[in-house]
Amino acid sequence: MYDLIILGAGPAGLTAGIYASRASLNVLIIEKGIEGGQIANTVDVENYPGIKNISGMELGMTMRAQAEEFGCEFAMDEVVSVELEGETKKVVGKFGEYEGKTLLIAAGASPRPMGAKGEEEFSGRGVSYCATCDAAFYQDLEVYVVGGGNSAVEEALFITRFAKKVHIIHRRDKLRATEAVQEKAFANEKIDFIWDSTIEEVKGDKIVNEIVIKNLKTGKVTNIKPNEPFGLFVFIGYVPQTEIFKDKLELENGYIKTDEEMRTNIEGVFAAGDIRVKNIRQVVTAAADGAIAALSADRYIDEKEGTLYEGLK
């Protein structure tokens, strides 16, 4: 029986593990992928306080090492069901079952697909959701990037380190990225823009070799079929990993609702990071959520067991 089970080893989950372990809680962190969550796919993190520049992968590994140093246990498993009611929280994974006095859900969110015909079929065969993972495969080739927010434009900028040309396809006539990011993109000679457009279909043989683009204003459909291989990267937001909680927790647009103490509508169950309802989703806010959730879980256990909550020294 663990004091706290944490689902997810991103910044929220790892920070929670660090704080909870320092509060002398027995902590298990369950992760189905690599530590760091989505931040592991980011090449440069330049806005985390106190660290001028670090890769997302390195930041995740550093957080994990710190959590392990303070005593957190880790399990590589994919959670398939949970039992949240009652004093004991039960988590069932593909490889094991786990029980805890409290549960923190910090499973984050996964890339949102376009929904275009052929997209799923060619995922990993020309369609990618991770520039850090796949951009190097398109050295001196052309790449198409779907999206207009910070993630899409920042990833497009990164891809220009490898590709000879990057075409950003956006469904609107202007970007949603911050001014600073936009300025970098507009000043980059390798980047051009296809406005007011979406991808209707992805085609190919063994790999992608053609995309069908539709202009939303004119209705014109264009088939793009270069003579050489090309990449298609999709960055249009994320989908919260809340499928197994949808009939158990209060959700809003798929995200878990919490109060300021990261408490959900069920006692002893907390949520932190990108998976919960919030306006700002950054590494630093995820870490803050995790710290708050860990202290809230510690307080909850103390109150249940009739001990005095002293916080962290």
Image (tube, rainbow, N blue to C red):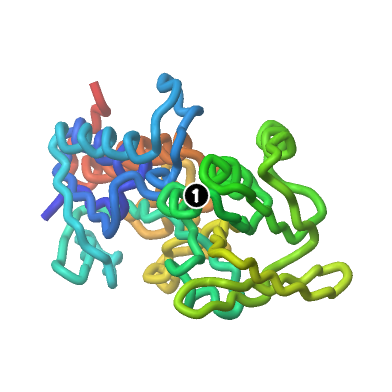
Q: Position of residue 70 (x, y in %)?
A: 16, 32
Residue 179: x %, y % from top left:
72, 34
Is 138 placed above or below 185 here?
Answer: below
Residue 77: percent from left, percent from top: 21, 62
Which quadrant holds residue 68?
A: top left
Asked if 138 appears above or below 162 in the picture, the reply is below
Depth order, front residue of 107/1: 107
The residue shown at (28%, 72%) is: 80
Find disc 1 in the rendering and name its residue: 139
Residue type pointed to by label 1: Gln
Circle 1: element type:
loop
User: In which quadrant of the rendered view does residue 58 lie?
Assistant: top left
* Whether residue 167 is visible: yes
Which image quadrant is residue 81 in? bottom left
Question: Is any atom of residue 268 visible in this view?
Answer: no
Establish if 16 lies above or below 225.
Answer: above
**Image: 45 above or below 268:** above
Residue at horizontal 54 percent and vertical 60 percent from the top = 231
Image side of residue 298 versus residue 265, left or right: left
Q: Is residue 151 toward the left or the right of residue 242 in the image? A: right
Depth check: give the residue in front, 13 or 91: 13
Q: Front-most of 313 and 17?
A: 17
The residue positioned 50% from the left and 54% from the top of the image is 138
Residue depicted at 41% across the width and 22% down the height: 51
